[in-house]
Image: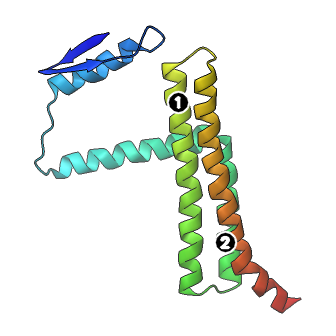
Amino acid sequence: MIVRAGNKFFQLPGRNFNTFFIRQILLKMKNNPTDNHFSFRRRWQSFRYALRGIGFMIKTQHNFWIHLTIAGLVVIAGFIFCLSITEWIFIIFAIGLVLSAETFNSAIEQLTDLTHPDIHPTAGLVKDLAAGAVLISAIAAAITGLLIFVPKIMVIL
């Protein structure tokens, strides 16, 4: 199917794709052309959207709760063991990486469910790949935490 938005034409996939959703996006693009001037109101609105997304994660995503709980425990341990600035940088980066990966994973899952509400092998693979990215980032964060905290714990023992 070919869809027109303004003076641009887009080729859309076959009937299994949610064409209504795509048409709505293209219509919005046509009616709201990109305006590049700076506006504090627009910047504030974009922060509100971002905070709404974070709120959605906190309210609805159980894995995000687990990651936040572990992050809180790591921060408490960081204060107990008096981490250096460099160690804090690695810890904060690792926490941010895992929380971001979990957020991207949820966004991909939401979008996949929207475009393929029925069970579809490719949709399942997309979700598995996104979940795998979260696992990779969580393993990297855990290794970072072990490299920082194990030597400090060994001094106490």
Is 4 placed above or below 144 here? above
User: Residue visible at 70% across and 60% down?
Assistant: 139
Q: How many marks?
A: 2
Please tell me whether mark 1 or mark 2 is closer to you in this view: 2
Q: Position of residue 133 (x, y in %)?
A: 60, 48
Q: Is residue 66 left or right of residue 45?
A: right
Quadrant housing the N terminus:
top left
Q: Residues within 10 Å of mark 1 (few under 14, many from 20)?
A: some
Q: Position of residue 155 (x, y in %)?
A: 82, 92
Mark earlier in primary sequence (1, 2): 1
**Label 2 sits on what residue type?**
Thr
User: Residue visible at 66% across and 57% down?
Assistant: 138
Is 22 placed above or below 65 here? above
Q: Secondary structure at mark 2?
A: helix
Question: Which corner quadrant of the image does residue 5 belong to?
Answer: top left
Q: Is residue 8 left or right of residue 112?
A: left
Q: Is residue 85 left or right of residue 24?
A: right
Q: Is residue 137 left or right of residue 1?
A: right
- Which is nearer the eye, 120 or 36? 120
Whether residue 79 appears in this view of the structure is yes
Quadrant housing the C terminus:
bottom right
Q: Check disc 2 and report the residue beneath it.
A: 144
- Which is nearer the eye, 14 or 118? 14
Q: Check disc 1 and report the residue beneath it.
A: 110
Q: Secondary structure at mark 1?
A: helix
User: Residue visible at 63% across and 27% down?
Assistant: 124
Q: Identify the residue at the far right of this view.
A: 157
Q: Position of residue 123 (x, y in %)?
A: 58, 25
